[in-house]
Amino acid sequence: MRLAPSLHRVGNDIVAVYLIDTPEGVTIIDAGLAGQRKELLAELDAMGRTLDDVRGVVLTHGDSDHIGFAERLRRDHGVPIFVHEADAARARGEESSKPEWGRLKLGATAKFMWYALRKNGLRTTPLTEVVAVRDGDRLDLPGAPVIIGLPGHSPGSIAIHVPAVDAVFVGDGLTTRHVLTGATGPQPAPFTDDPAEALASLHRIAGLGAAWVLPGHGSPWHGGVEQAVAEVERAAAASGA
C-alpha cells in the first residue's frame, strides 16, 4: 500500500511493516510476522523492486511480531538487520519479557491472536546476527534513518526518524489500534515493560515536526507527531495509566 511518495506499508492495522523507497534502494522498518513475507514480495513487485533492492531492515524493537521474516532476509539475501543494542538479545531469542496484558476485549484479542496464527506468528525464527545501533545514530541506508531511543515498551525500543519521507516510525512506542481492546486513536501500547517510562519517552519525538507517525499496530497517523503524542498522554490520563 502506497502511503505517500517513497513510503509504503505492508500488512494492516493489526500488524504493519513499512518500506522507504529511494533511488539508492529500499529500507524496511520492522519485519512483522513471518507469514507477511509474501505480502512484502507483492509490495516490492508493485514498486518495481525485488529483494535485491533491500539494503537493510531496521527493527523498532526485538519482539516476535516485529522480527518475523527478518532472519530469512538476512540468511537468504544477506540483508543486514539493525536493532538497538539493548534489544539485541531479545531479537536473538536469548531474552524475553512477560509484561501484564492489562484490559482486553475478547473479540479484539481473538482477532489479533487468530491473525498472528494465520501469519505464522508462532513460527518466528530469532535472529542469528544483528547490527547493534544506539540513540543518535544516522544509518547509511536509503532515507538516512536516524535512531531515537524510546525505551519503555522494551529497553531497546526506538523511534526511527526519516525526514526524507516526513515520518517517524514508532513501533510499539504508541499505538493507534489497541490489539487487545480494538480501541482506535493514539494511545499507550499494550504488552509494555514499563508504561511510565514509555510515556515519558514520547517527549523525545514530540518536537520532530514529522507529519506521519507510523506505529507497528494501527492506522498510519498523518496529523503530526505533536498531536499524536498529546493524544497518547490524554488517553493515558483518562485510563489512569
Image (cartoon, grey):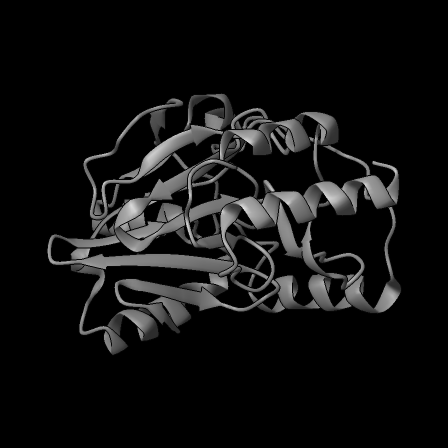
Residue 177 seen in this snapshot: yes
Q: Is residue 11 shown left or right of residue 106?
A: left
Q: Is residue 59 above or below residue 223?
A: above
Q: Position of residue 23 (x, y in %)?
A: 11, 58
Which residue is nearer to you in this view: 102 or 120?
A: 102
Please tell me which residue is depicted at 35% across the width and 65% down the height of the picture: 8
Q: Quadrant of the C terminus?
A: top right
> Which quadrant of the view contains residue 131?
top left
In the rendered view, tell whether residue 5 sits above or below residue 102: below
Above or below, comparing residue 138 to residue 35 in the picture: above
Tell which of 101 and 189 is nearer to you: 189
Q: Is residue 192 left or right of residue 125?
A: right
**What percent of the width, then of the height, locates residue 105?**
87, 61
Closer to us: 163 or 157: 163
Q: Which image quarter holds the N terminus? A: bottom left
Residue depicted at 78% across the width and 56% down the height:
180
